Image: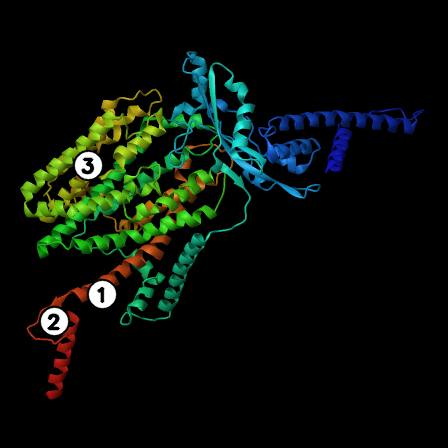
Amino acid sequence: MRRILLLVCIVAAHGQQSVVQLDDQGVDFQFQERVQLQSVLSAKSRFSSQFKNIVDSLTSFNPTLNASGKCGEYSMLAKRAAGNLELWALQMYDSTGRIPPSLLNGNVNQYGDFDQCLQIKHRLEESDETIRGQYVLAFLDLQAEDSVTDPQLKHLLTLAHSYDVIRSNFSDPGHRIPRYTTINWGLCVPSSCNAKDVEEGLRDTLSVLDSLPELKLAVHVDPKMLYKAEPFNPDITTLAVICLFASLISAVIVASILDQAGKNFKKQTKCKRVLMAFSLRKTWTELLNTRSAADDISPIHGLRFLNAVALLLCHKSMALFFYPYINRTALSLRLADPWTVIGRTAILYTDSFVVFSGLLVAYSFIKELDKKGSLDFGTKLKSRFLRISPNFVAIILFCTYILQLMGSGPQWNLVVKHYSDICKTHMWKNFLFIHNYFGFENMCLTHTHQLGIDMQLFIISPALVYLLWKRPRTGSIILIFIAAFSTWLRFSVTFNYELSSIIYFGNTVKKMFDTCNKSYILPSHRLTVYIMGILTGFYLRRNPNGIQFNTVTTLLAWTFLGLVCIYPWFSPYNMSSHDYKYDAMEAANYAAWAPVLWSLFIISLIFVCHQNRGGFIGIFMRWKVFQIFTKISYAVYLTQFPIYFYNVGTTKFSGYSSVTHLFVLSEILTVLISSIILTLLVDLPFQEIKKILTESETGLKLKIELNDDVPTAGGKRSISLTETSARERVLQRSHTMNG
């Protein structure tokens, strides 16, 4: 290697020499060669000196050089080897992040070279040991002292922190909401170093900044953020989950082949019918089926699609804060535009799904109460559990045991593996649908909190709906009182704890988690909009023709729609400014009344479009294609965050931010394709299996008491419906033969 560098130096120096024109007469050719050789050697000497300066500059930043044990020993060997131009040592230093340009534009996160660091492997001949590269993502927090009053220094730090969109510190969880003002710095050190070695060495190296009276610097190295090149060695549980998914795919393949070959098991054993439920031909046909029931509320399908798209964009905008953009400050300024308030109001779009849930539950329960006079809630609860659980369990197992094996990157352990570790400990809470009561910090797959809320609201819904069905007037008053109490809860908690359901400049990660834990993920705070959905479902069932609209009432309805959506959608526009000062009363009023007005907007839109008075909007909402999206919407909800964080975790270099990053086509297609796959392989097959099992249980439960005495060991017994049918068929055949 050194010979090659020397040759390059000589050739480069030779090419830089000026051509000396000498008179051929009386000039000694050997003298000319000596002059040229001396010039080349002189140039080589200058180049070697300059290159040595570059290497010295490269190796000057070495936080683990003074560490104890093998860490310091190998760091010293790497420094010496780099001075001798050994490739492995130069790669170790080259993989460490450097102070970049554009610091005042927010380019403070430097990842270095993740892949190059992990590829380093050097064998020591004298000790038969191997030095391997280890990547470390260290966290730095640089702030101005509280006593500093210099506005210029504060402004410079504000620019470096990208206007403090989300203020954070080391103690904040960083897996769901980014530690935006924390600096992420990539280092490459010998694998013999531990987190304490790196943290102490980095703190000593950067002590010059901490010694300045105007600044305070904190350094933290999390042991979980150390990466080594390790062989694939899954544990027994991971292998079991891989085998489970392999078995699922095998069942799909076998069922699809048998179905294509014309094997019909409809009239044979339940096991064969269960197997055929996984046939891709059947599930694909069911997915594309747009037939609907006669009493279907078709505008809900279009509204579900629009709210799902809005949530996709809101969640993506949060994921963007994890990326190490070169122009983060410019990105923050774009977020200060007033129109971005539409993306800050994500809570409204989740409230829409709570309204849909309450509406459809009441719509279904009232129909059964009118028909039977009672509700078989045990069967309904079991049916709902079987409806939700397969997709839920599949995505949890995939993210916990398989996704963590599918990639790597500087933030991989933070946004992917950390979720895996949490789920291994806490997934049982998800399976019981109680995970929303244990806080966002330790929740397995935080975006699934809505499933816990929905299940808990569903459990109390029979009492609410039955009361409304039995005593409509009294029930309506009681339900309105409960909704008002839920509204008061949101107001008081938001005001007393100074929370905010809208992300504003300067909000802290701690306050955002407090908002989630104390309000957003609690069913008692979402009960208002759920009850509004129940009341709407009751009204639509009692008045199938709805409100009779004429031209005047249609105009009034659309005017009302425009008015009620203004406050929840546009009133927090001032929170978009980076100069915004938090107002507890303003935040509390919004938390209390925005869900109510937004739900009125959604409900009114359903009424207008359901009565064919929505014009082109109503036609769009009732488009049958949205029924297909309804079937994959649950899977879209489950898959989007794992895909977003997979892309965050595998990002290894800084990039340039633009508005188009909200709409990355490849990412959107990945979400849709993953959702379709999950629906075809898990959701639809298990819905069919649920029907098969329900049919079997119904046949066992339905018994008709007969007057005939059937002798048994204990006396008389009743005869099941299937047994009665069999006896009737025998009697019919007997009469036929006698005839």
Query: Secondary structure under badge 3?
Result: helix
Disc on the earlier residue, 1 or 2: 1
Residues at circles 1 and 2 in contact by the CB criterion of under 8 Å: no
Q: Are marks 2 and 3 in contact (CB under 8 Å)?
A: no
Q: Amino acid at mark 3?
A: Phe
Foreground mark, 2 or 3, reads 2
How far, Cα to Cα, is label 2 from label 3? 57 Å
State the image coordinates of residue 498 (x, y, percent, origin top left). 27, 25
- Most extreme residue toward the bottom is 738
Residue highlighted by disc 3: 601
Q: Is residue 121 something that shows in the picture?
A: no
Residue type, mark 1 in image: Ser
Disc 2: which residue = 717
N-term-proximal mark, 1 vs 3:
3
Q: Determine whether the residue tagged by mark 1 lies in a helix, strand or loop.
A: helix
Residue 340 percent location from the top left of the image: 33, 30
> On the picture, is 470 further left or further right than 30?
left
Q: Which mark is residue 641?
A: none
What label does residue 696 carry, if any?
1
Picture quadrant where residue 78 is located: top right
Q: CA distance from mark 1 to mark 2?
A: 20 Å
Q: Residues within 10 Å of mark 1 (few under 14, many from 20)?
A: few
Residue sitting at x 63%, y 28%: 58
Residue at figure coordinates x 83%, y 24% from the top left: 20
Locate residue 381 relative to residue 91 in the image: left or right.
Answer: left
Tell me what residue is drawn at x 28 percent, y 61 percent: 689
Closer to us: mark 1 or mark 2?
2
Assign a secondary structure to mark 2.
Answer: loop
Q: Looking at the figure, which quarter contains the N terminus?
A: top right
Q: Nearer the viewer, residue 138 or 593?
A: 138
